[in-house]
Image (spheres, rainbow, N blue to C red):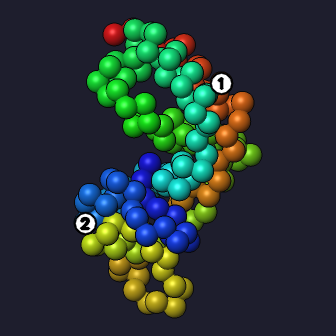
Amino acid sequence: MGGNSPVSDNDKAEYNFAQDPKSVRTVLTSPILQNRISCLVTAQACSKNVIDDKAWDDIIEKSQAGKGILSKVFEVESSKDTFKYDPVSAFVLANLLSNSDLVSTKVTDVIINQETGLLINTPSNCGDSERSVSVNIVDEVNIGSEYLSFINDAMSNDPDI
């Protein structure tokens, strides 16, 4: 997860990108990593696709009752919303290649603002190909019963630690 949707009017970068924009640029433009980064699941994609509060509270309650990794995460970080976007990102990555009905992406040429960490659309005639990078950005996530099944599977297969 990371970044922002460069076509939105959001003027705030996703937390990780805002903390170290220069490293983001280094990673996204690295020839070694370019073929290994399958997509960016932006903060906007996650925030408009999270499940409702009741379903999220149920997930937290079930995970806290267990003895696995998820229960340990919530022991360390008690704020219930801290990880709310992470399951959406995991769901996207699990379904990205196998189910185009659940996740759609769009390749976009962007420049990374070195001060703010915001991804900015690169105009096709900008001629600044050295600073521009093509990234595959999650456009839509169809959250539904498949998402809840994915989460329940993760909890029931959460190994005891």
Residue sitting at x 26%, y 57%: 19
Of residues 148 and 77, which is closer to you in this image? 77
| Picture layout, residue 120 above or below residue 42 | below
* Image x and y of residue 61, in percent: 50, 17
| Picture layout, residue 144 above or below residue 134 | above
Q: How far, Cα to Cα, is label 1 from label 2?
A: 38 Å
| Picture layout, residue 7 above or below residue 75 | below
Of residues 48 and 118, which is closer to you in this image? 48
Horizontal side, residue 24 vs residue 102: left or right: left
Kind of residue sitting beneath label 1 = Ser
Residue sitting at x 60%, y 50%: 48
Horizontal side, residue 5 vs residue 105: left or right: left
Classify residue 120 by image quadrant: bottom left
Classify residue 112 by image quadrant: bottom left
* Image x and y of residue 145, in percent: 72, 30
State whether residue 133 appears in this view: no
Find residue 135 and name its label.
Answer: none
Q: Mark 2 points at which residue?
A: 22
Answer few, some or many: residues within 10 Å of disc 1's Cα (few below 14, many 20 plus, some between 14 and 19): few
Q: Pointer 1 and pointer 2: residues touching (CB < 8 Å)?
A: no
Kind of residue sitting beneath label 2 = Lys
Of residues 91 and 44, which is closer to you in this image? 44
Answer few, some or many: residues within 10 Å of disc 2's Cα (few below 14, many 20 plus, some between 14 and 19): some
Residue sitting at x 57%, y 37%: 91
Find residue 149 and name its label.
Answer: 1
* Image x and y of residue 80, in percent: 43, 30
Element under disc 1: helix
* Image x and y of residue 133, in percent: 43, 71
Of residues 84 and 42, which is closer to you in this image? 84
Element under disc 2: helix
Horizontal side, residue 147 vs residue 132: left or right: right
